[in-house]
Amino acid sequence: MTDMERRIIAAVDEQKDDLIAFFRELLQCRSFTGKEQEVAAKLIGGLRARGMEEVELVERTPGRPNVLAYYRGAEEGPTCTFNGHLDVLPPQDYASWDHPPFAADMEDGRIYGRGTVDMKTGTFSSFFAGLILQQLKVPIRGQVLFTGVCDELVCGNDGILYLIEKGYIKKEHPEDFGINCEPTDLRELEMATKGVLRADILVKGKGAFNARPYLGISAIDKAVKFIEAVQQLHQEISTDPAFTHPLLAPRTVQVAMIQGGEASNLVPEQVKMTVTRRMHPGETEEGCLADYQRIIDRLHGEDPEFVAEIHPWPGFRPPVEVSMDIPLVDAVRKALKLASGTDLQLTGSEGGTDASHVVARTGIPMPVFGPGDHNLLGTNQEHVKVEDFLNAIKTYALTVYYMMGIEA
């Protein structure tokens, strides 16, 4: 173990009580999407009080904060961008939680609460790694940018997309890289991510009094045909041997929500269905929407009374993949092994993250790697192991040192 490796690990261990206390204070903020102001203010104040020299608040919309912190190196070089989000899911039924969702209770080596997995542990442990780098004045080339964004849970228009649009996150150096800190149980480095495309399909009928249904056209009856066609499309794309990926489960498409009918005594005039598509790298938004249009055209050809429109949702997350040969893989593997004794696994992600926007829009390689068991995401048992929280800080700081450090 080198002197710097030893110092990084020792610094986290020596400050663990303060880091845990700061983390629990941030967990207690009810930072639902649109209400991230309190957690952003506490994060900025706590970082500055602990020696972080360059921290700023960036907003597209007043009250929608993004927190950015920098650690600058002594020499020119690449930028390492850490990315995480500040907003959390609602806890739903408070009474069902054994530990109150915003108490940040600590018991048996675990910290409980909404957002521990998705994804305050990953977000804040990256910022805390920045604190360690700053305090130790670890000599690096380039700079490290830590980002905690708003709006991720609703696709990031005020968050990651704004930071990319305004050039806060951009590729300027051939060796630029990043890490998205979403939960991978601190053992998986996700090198490929499925895309997420949502679209509303509006099926139109003709209203009438349902004592005389022959005077109307039931949009629900017509919608059944579209649902059956989507089920067939799912079967086709999920079993297509010509379109597979070594790190990802098969592609999927599903009718996820349905709204239809106006009253129990009326022939339903329209039905709105939300279709969710999980895509592989190589697929495009335009291609997937064309699949839906072909279904609509076919059904209309078979039944002229079938009429439907496609309305894509904003916030499309493209499917992306990162080369498994990049130096970051070996750096994370080495850092994780030293910090926790764990062997790194290369995998893919079924869900969407802000890393997809970064990779697709800037070209910066940004795999996903962070603490927290994703199986607990959104549940009333959401928690993180204290050991994983501390090991994440060590692993992130060591990764920066391995990738960018300057030897004395």
Image: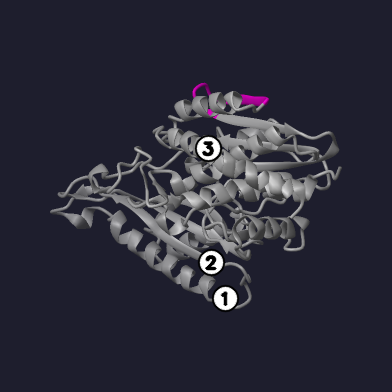
Colour scheme employed for the rendering of this structure: one colour
Q: Is residue 54 magenta?
A: yes
The answer for how far apart the CA atoms under marks 1 and 2 are is: 9 Å
The answer for how far apart the CA atoms under marks 3 and 2 are is: 41 Å
Nearest to viewer (mark 1 / mark 2): 2
Nearest to viewer (mark 3 / mark 2): 3
The answer for how far apart the CA atoms under marks 3 and 1 are is: 49 Å
Nearest to viewer (mark 3 / mark 1): 3
Please tell me the numbered disc located at residue 211.
none
The residue located at (31%, 54%) in the rendering is: 219
The image position of residue 278, as x and y in percent, is 52, 60
Q: Is residue 125 above or below residue 291?
A: above
| Location of residue 158 by image quarter | top right
Residue toward you, 308 or 392: 392
Instruction: Specify the farthest residue to the top.
Output: 62
Name the amino acid type tagged 3. Answer: Leu
Q: Secondary structure at mark 1?
A: loop
The residue located at (62%, 65%) in the rendering is: 343
Q: Residues within 10 Å of mark 2 (few under 14, many from 20)?
A: many
Asked if disc 1 and disc 2 are in contact, CB closer than 8 Å, the reply is yes
Task: Name the residue that disc number 1 marks.
Answer: 240
Name the amino acid type tagged 2. Answer: Arg
Task: Name the residue that disc number 3 marks.
Answer: 19
State the quadrant of the N terminus. bottom right
Question: What are the residue bounds of the magenta stretch?
Answer: 53-65
Task: Name the residue that disc number 2 marks.
Answer: 251
Q: Residues within 10 Å of mark 3 (few under 14, many from 20)?
A: some
